[in-house]
Image (cartoon, rainbow, N blue to C red):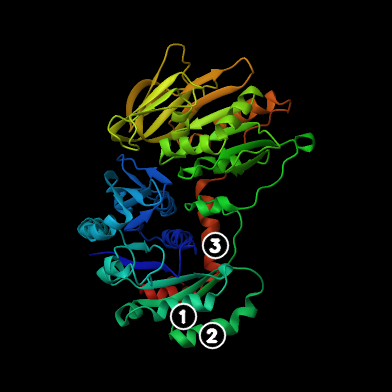
Amino acid sequence: MLAKTIMVQGTASNVGKSIVTTALCRILKRRGYRVAPFKAQNMANNSYVTREGGEIGRAQAVQAIASGIEPSQRMNPILLKPSSDRTSQVVVMGKPASTLSAKDYQHKKTDLLPVIEQALDQLRREFDIVVIEGAGSPAEINMKANDIVNMRIAKMVQAPVILVADIDKGGVFAQIIGTFELLDSEEKKLVKTFLINKFRGDKDILTSGVEWIEEKMKRKCLGVIPMIKDLGIEEEDAVVLDEPREKFYRSSSTRLLINVIRFPRISNFTDFETLAREEDVLLRYIDKPDRHCLPDVLILPGTKSTIADLQFLRSSGFDEYIGRCVKSGVTVFGICGGYQMLGDTIEDPYHIESFESAVIGLSFLRMKTVFQKEKTTVQVKALHLDSQCMIEGYEIHMGQSIHMNGNTPLFRILKRQGQAVDDDEGSNQTLDTSAQISGTYIHGLFDNDDFRRYFLNQIRKKVGLESLSAKNNRNALDVYDALADVFEKNMDMTVLSEILGEQLV
């Protein structure tokens, strides 16, 4: 027997579809259902490596964890990783398949429908309910003919659709009614309810408006969800990095200032969310050099386009800013693409990223990186050599880095994809200025509580602040339960029960 399905679609991008999907997965899990998430096509440079070594969108990994199951590439069979404004790497069932322009992909993407259908069918044979997430809006008229993620998927499995709108954007009535009216008659039949997200204030004020929409659509409202601040759940869209920056004054602060360079193609910025949640840290994303204040730590994060973003560093003056940080004793830390930039050279013999065969790096670490045709996507367990802290994380990169004489490794890899190994990884160098330059390919290392606190305490000691004790993250599932609690309190569970044909109340 195939699983039931329910689908979350939105009136636009960033209205909260991923969070709504996560909440539904957790709600159904808590009621004893075997539930799995699914998104036919995701576009994100924030990705996750599954136990099988496949790459999927980070949101689907989060949704799987909320469902109490292991993330799998079947949950996100097509992942687009933008490498420029007009091109993306196309990842199919966890593995890179091609790099295409947006125009070429539009012409070819319907060829991937059999892959999508097979992945969804496999999930439906294994679980009780599959919660499907759409992308963008189903009412993009210019995109509908080649749709592989919204209404085509809903029609494929006759999934009832929840239409989500973001009231914080403004114009929520036009969002909902406009989207609904642009659907054809078959699509309208699949839309069973609507949900208003990110509401601030007294919900009673909205009652007459909700009733007006219900009358227009002849559908009951599923709920009005309040604006939830500090969810503690990883965000996927880089739009969250646009929040105003808090000012920092060293003379009056006992917090550490950590600046993360916001590359145009930044990837896996979720690496730093646990750092940002530490009470003794102010973490900021900067897209231009800060002329007024040097940080305690400067991080070069991952990027989908290492060579292009290295050029961005130089054209924007960040190379000089990094040099100024180093001369002033600031700790500089690179992850993945940021790590590659810190080396002497980056070679691209197969022109994976560039027409150039080699470019000069920032030359703070004695190493060269050579891009390979095959992409490394592995989960790892490692020992941090200085602290002896054990960490778990994952690697996603095209290049292999070769270190010169005198390199001090940062980690010792003990397992890759569950297989025992004994490999040095990363690089660590302390300069005469007391600046420490470090780099690694391991994403997720700051999610490890003991290592994160050791790292921060080393910086605190360096700037004359007292060390703090490690505070373990709250149970990872607590945040999903808290999210589910908010949704259950503000949703009409009777409406959800009727849509699914299941007794949930």
- Amino acid, disc 1: Ile
Q: Which residue is mark 2?
A: 211
Residue nearer the viewer, 99 or 351: 351
Please tell me which of labels 2 and 1 falls first in the chain. 1
**Image: 392 above or below 403:** below
Q: Amino acid at mark 3?
A: Asp
The amino acid sitting under disc 2 is Glu
Residue 453 in view in this figure: no
Q: Position of residue 463 (x, y in %)?
A: 71, 26
Residue located farthest toward the top when viewing the structure as drawn: 405
> Relative to the observer, which residue lies in front, 83 or 147?
83
In front: label 2 or label 3: 2
- Percent across and percent down for residue 72 are 32, 48
Residue at x 53%, y 18% (from the top left corner): 429
- Quarter of the image holding residue 289? top right
For disc 1, the neighbor class at 10 Å (few under 14, some 14 to 19, many from 20) is some
Give the class, few, some or many, for how many residues have Cα within 10 Å of label 2's Cα (few <14, many ≥20). Answer: some
Q: Which mark is residue 177?
A: 1
Q: CA distance from mark 2 to mark 3?
A: 25 Å
Q: Position of residue 414 (x, y in %)?
A: 39, 24
Q: CA distance from mark 1 to mark 3?
A: 28 Å
Query: Would you name the residue on which mark 3 appears?
Result: 485
Q: Nearer the viewer, mark 2 or mark 1?
A: 1
Q: Check the image and report above or below for 305 versus 175.
A: above
Q: Is 416 situated above or below 139? A: above
Asked if the residue under mark 3 is in contact with the one under mark 1, i.e. CB atoms within 8 Å, the reply is no
Q: Quadrant of residue 490?
A: bottom right
Does residue 56 appear anywhere in the picture?
A: yes
